[in-house]
């Protein structure tokens, strides 16, 4: 996904802030209201939902409940941040869910069957994530396969590898092996602390999610690396002609996505305490949804870290709220769909920018 904003001269920028540029007439009230809706609408929806669930159950805003929501969405948010990285460089990664599932199975196999400690499992999983990211970059940048098709193929390859490694079975402590013996290893306490540990009252997954969100925000908004990633998204050929090593930056985006997906898988493995062979399957759509939501937050019209984090939090708010008021599980998928529809309304319907989405790329003309 590329986000290109053109026609945003200084005078227009002044008008976008609600002011009046030199020699310009005040904007009509309808236009100003529309700008407010586009800029703040998504945040208003989030606050309204929190208020609604709090009215029904005052404990919804209790610190334990808030940390519970954030802990719940940390894997989704991390995978979403990975997809967001690929969106900045005109791409998309469909292998993010399989990479997370691969991480769950590999971590479990390393500790339970390989009888290794948690630190070794984390190292092996992150190396696996690095390999998946490099495979995606190889297919896209060297073999010239379109992003959607390349990462779709990688998704099936990774799922197949995962099933081969664990013989198609979930891995758990004391499981029987093919030779009739019992697995000697187990999920170690240091590994389980990835999800179950706390620093003061704050769960470890929440800290990891917050730190990575801030780091990615800083890289994208405050460093040359971030500016180049957005420039590639705006016009890859022009960026290349300016002397930028476009392939290197795009490779970094795909590797970063796979590493974040692997980290999300580590949190899932620590949460469930076994190598569930089906883990990570639903993460793909959630990650893409929250990454797309980021485009609409604050009317920025481009993928960004805080918008992705907010999208993940909103999904967590709805999931927790629906569960709290006793709605059936399938209402959660309905809620996620509503979130994406609302986000797309703010990006494509209410916004004055014209945003085109073609096979994973987005351009906006203001």
Image: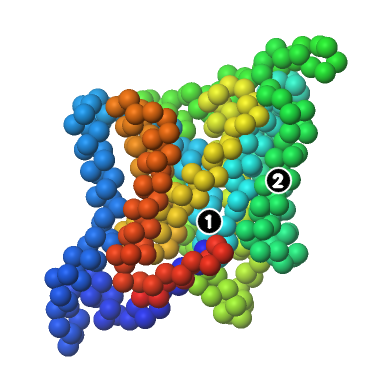
Please tell me in which quadrant of the rendered image residue 313 appears: top left
Q: Is residue 296 visible?
A: no
Left or right: 134 in relation to 318: right
Query: What residue is disc 2 on?
Result: 156
Q: Residue at x 40, y 41 (%)?
A: 334
Q: Residue at x 76, y 13 (%)?
A: 176
Q: What numbered label is drawn on residue 153?
A: none
Helix, strand or loop at mark 1: helix
Query: What residue is disc 1 on?
Result: 85
Q: 10 Å neighbourhood of mark 1: few (<14), some, or many (≥20)?
A: many
Q: How many marks?
A: 2
Q: Nearer the viewer, mark 1 or mark 2?
A: 2
Q: How far apart are the alpha carbons under marks 1 and 2?
A: 21 Å
Which residue is situated farthest in the bottom direction here?
23
Helix, strand or loop at mark 2: helix
Front one among 1 and 337: 337
In the rendered image, residue 134, in percent from the top left (x then y), is placed at 70, 53
Q: Residue at x 58, y 73 (%)?
A: 236
Left or right: 128 in relation to 229: right
Which residue is situated farthest in the right direction here?
179
In the rendered image, residue 268, in percent from the top left (x then y), is placed at 55, 31
Q: Residue at x 62, y 69 (%)?
A: 246
Front one among 16 and 222: 16
In the rendered image, residue 154, in percent from the top left (x then y), is placed at 70, 50
Measured along the vertical axis of the image, is residue 353 above or below residue 41?
below
Q: Where the C terminus falls, by quadrant?
A: bottom left
Q: Are marks 1 and 2 in contact (CB under 8 Å)?
A: no
In the rendered image, residue 57, in percent from the top left (x then y), is placed at 23, 26
Q: Is residue 13 visible?
A: yes
Measured along the vertical axis of the image, is residue 89 above or below residue 197?
below
Please tell me in which quadrant of the rendered image residue 207 appears: top left
Front one among 360 and 239: 360
């Amino acid at each position: 996904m590329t986000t290109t904003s053109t026609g945003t001269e200084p005078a227009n920028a002044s008008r976008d802030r609600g002011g009046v540029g030199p020699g310009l007439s005040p904007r009509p009230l309808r236009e100003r209201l529309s700008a407010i809706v586009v800029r703040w609408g998504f945040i208003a929806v989030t606050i309204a939902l929190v208020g609604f669930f709090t009215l029904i159950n005052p404990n919804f805003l209790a610190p334990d409940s808030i940390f519970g929501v954030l802990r719940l969405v940390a894997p989704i948010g991390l995978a979403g941040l990975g997809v967001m990285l690929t969106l900045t460089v005109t791409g998309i990664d469909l292998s993010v869910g399989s990479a997370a599932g691969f991480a769950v199975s590999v971590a479990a196999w390393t500790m339970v069957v390989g009888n290794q400690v948690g630190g070794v499992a984390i190292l092996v999983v992150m190396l696996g994530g690095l390999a998946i990211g490099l495979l995606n970059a190889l297919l896209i940048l060297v073999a010239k396969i379109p992003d959607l098709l390349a990462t779709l193929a990688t998704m099936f390859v990774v799922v197949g590898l995962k099933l081969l490694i664990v013989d198609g079975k979930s891995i758990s402590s004391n499981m029987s092996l093919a030779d009739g013996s019992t697995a000697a290893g187990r999920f170690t306490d240091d590994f389980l602390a990835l999800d179950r540990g706390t620093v003061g009252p704050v769960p470890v997954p929440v800290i990891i999610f917050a730190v990575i969100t801030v780091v990615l925000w800083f890289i994208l908004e405050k460093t040359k690396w971030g500016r180049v990633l957005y420039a590639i998204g705006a016009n890859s050929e022009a960026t290349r002609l300016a002397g930028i090593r476009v392939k290197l930056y795009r490779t970094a985006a795909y590797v970063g996505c796979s590493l974040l997906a692997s980290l999300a898988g580590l949190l899932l493995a620590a949460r469930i305490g076994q190598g569930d062979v089906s883990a990570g399957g639903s993460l793909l759509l959630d990650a893409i949804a929250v990454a797309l939501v980021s485009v609409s937050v604050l009317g920025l019209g481009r993928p960004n870290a805080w918008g992705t984090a907010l999208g993940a939090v909103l999904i967590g708010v709805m999931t927790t709220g629906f569960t709290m008021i006793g709605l059936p599980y399938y209402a959660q998928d309905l809620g996620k769909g509503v979130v994406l529809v609302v986000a797309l309304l703010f990006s494509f319907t209410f916004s004055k920018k014209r945003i085109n989405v073609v096979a994973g790329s987005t351009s906006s003309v203001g």
